[in-house]
Image: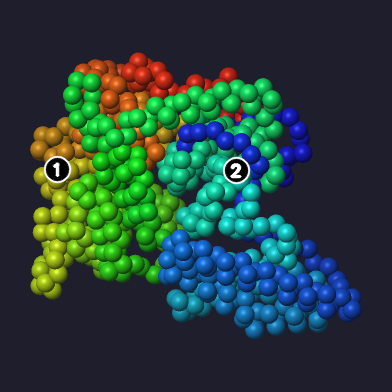
Amino acid sequence: MPDSAARGERVLHGIPASRGVCRGRLFVVRPAEVREPPRYAIQPEDVQSEMDRLEAALVLSRQQLRKLKEQVAQALGQQEALLFEAQLMVLEDPVLLEGVRTLVRDSLVNVDHAFATVAQRFVASFAAMQDDYLKERAADVRDATQRVLHNLLNPDEPQDLSEIREPCILVAHDLTPSQTAVLDRQMILGFATDLGSQTSHTAILARAMHLPAVTGLRDATQRLATGDYALLDGFNGLLIVNPTDQTLYQYGQLARQYQVLEERLREVRELPAVTLDGHRITLSANIENPAEADEVVAQGAEGVGLFRTEFLFMERLELPSEEEQFEVYRGLAEKLHPAPVIIRTLDLGGDKMLNYRDQYPERNPFLGWRAIRICLAEPEMFRAQLRAILRAAVTGNVKMMYPMISGIDEVDQANALLEQCKAELEKEGLPFDRDLEVGVMIEIPSAVLTAEAIARRVRFFSIGTNDLVQYSLAADRLNPRIAHLHQPTHPAVVRLIKQTIDAGHAAGIWVGVCGEMAGDPALAALLIGLGADELSVAPPLVPAVKHLIRSLKLSEARQLADFALKEENTGAILEACQELARRADPKLFVARPPAAPDSSGGKP
Ligand code: PEP
Ligand code: MG
């Protein structure tokens, strides 16, 4: 139950996921399931008004779906918008609608109850079908009927994020890519979610949008209500409901410091990422969407160090064809040419699921059917991507890397498929890059321990610290209850990174880091000291990391790394990193507000 009626300042503690401060009204997204409507008897003379209510809810639902279809078509393409076409068809289904009308007329019950009852049966009958295609339609039927039910029960409460009319702080249990695709970005001041961490989709999206975000607030959606007034502090991971004048004043000052910092950082965008003693680092950007290419250039990155291609595959009804992928990769490569674009092959699974295939539920999705494992088991899908990348590589400076490599077998199998694709393209006479530079992500401890052998098979390593930390410390990266265990400065992680870099260098290949660790200026110093050649970070973080690199000597970063490799204590390593960064430029760090008491009812 929302307890927003209780006035007075309340502070909810979460995980700082994207820097910045904002304040405004909350818009709380309720989970999709609609409550079971109550059942009550009606009089025969009420039947018509119940039918009218049903008609009004159907009209509203159709309008909403048509609008969503248009918005998704614009944001993600026609193919993705078909999802809503299928739902519109559900709302015309005579079996469903007649079933509801008959139940109301014959049993004299309220229309919400009748609709919920018939819809439930309808969903169950689709789910039980033998035919895979029809079985998958159960999800469309469920979504469409829940929309009608919501409109019957709460016709005035918007249920689509695209219907938000005033700028607000979006509070959600979690946000999916399909929800965020239809967001009107002008209407969003910041994000606050129950789930998630610094490396979840919401966090990555918020950083790309330059909006403050706090994740891991646990039960914020239960405790807060749309319309509550709050301040969101993305530096310190706080959501402060009903902030006092004193709090607002303190944050006003903090916002001014942040603005000054942003202005200073603008100056370094055009300059190279070189340390005071002349050591050059390649500073690239991570993107999920080709539309971010302009941002990569605007923020002063030297190319794309990680293009997460899975977002081309999600929220749609079928796989993107080789041709469609080729066009996307080619467009990006041409736009950024001569800067490099590192395309990562599909990393589906874990928290990035597909719409159009049977999702066999897994108990441990991060340890399951994910990334290269799916690609090697479904070579047709993988080959379409490999061929598209090989072909796009002639139009720009394209490199490719495989995610989630656990050892040499996967690299050998993937490379063998790549060679087959090259032979096919050769035969077909299609232009492609015979010498495509291929690397791997190092993000599983077994890959670190066999990095020497892997290095002989590829031309670069890119360390994925988000997963490397998750897998080496056995700490689910999405679980807010153990977010405090996601520690990139854990001595084990520091040593794994060092071992990877040394193995790469011994084999004569370059080593980059593309996990979120690289985007934290203090930790970037440690990575440079450990020998990283390239750092790839969210576009808005490029200026701060570049400024840090330009304010520091390689010799200082190496001293820091030497210390970290000997130190046993995670906290001591983190403090040493922060101290060096603060020494390099104290202004790089926005001050914390005075300690806010935790009134969130427990430790985050
Ligand atoms: C990582 O694991 O660090 C990484 C960059 O990949 P992703 O966050 O997409 O898993
Ligand atoms: Mg990863």
Can you see residue 203?
A: no
- Residue under the point 75% across and 82% down: 102
Q: What residue type is labelled 2?
A: Ile
| Residue 465 image point, x, y percent | 32, 38
Determine the secondary structure under disc 2: strand
* Residue 333 location, quadrant: bottom left
| Residue 152 image point, x, y percent | 73, 66
Location of the C terminus (image quadrant):
top right
Q: Are marks 2 and 1 in contact (CB under 8 Å)?
A: no
What residue did someone put label 1 on? 455
Determine the secondary structure under disc 1: helix
N-terminal label among 2 and 1? 2
- Left or right of residue 243, residue 559 in this image: left
Position of residue 92 relative to residue 327, above or below, is: below
Can you see residue 166?
A: yes
- Residue under the point 32% across and 34% down: 269
Q: Does the residue labelled 1 lie within 8 Å of ligand 1?
A: no
Label 2 Cα crowd, 10 Å radius (few <14 / some 14-19 / many 20+): many
Q: Nearer the viewer, residue 531 or 277?
A: 277
In this rendering, the count of numbered labels is 2
Label 1 Cα crowd, 10 Å radius (few <14 / some 14-19 / many 20+): many
Q: Which amino acid does label 1 sit on?
A: Ala
* Residue 9 location, quadrant: top right
- Residue under the point 59% across and 26% down: 252
Q: Which of 498 and 27 is in front in this view?
A: 27
* Residue 45 location, quadrant: bottom right
Position of residue 425 relative to residue 399, above or below, is: below
Position of residue 527 relative to residue 419, above or below, is: above
- Residue under the point 58% across and 19% down: 594
Disc 2/disc 1 C-alpha distance (Å): 46 Å
| Residue 214 image point, x, y percent | 53, 37
What residue did someone put label 2 on? 169
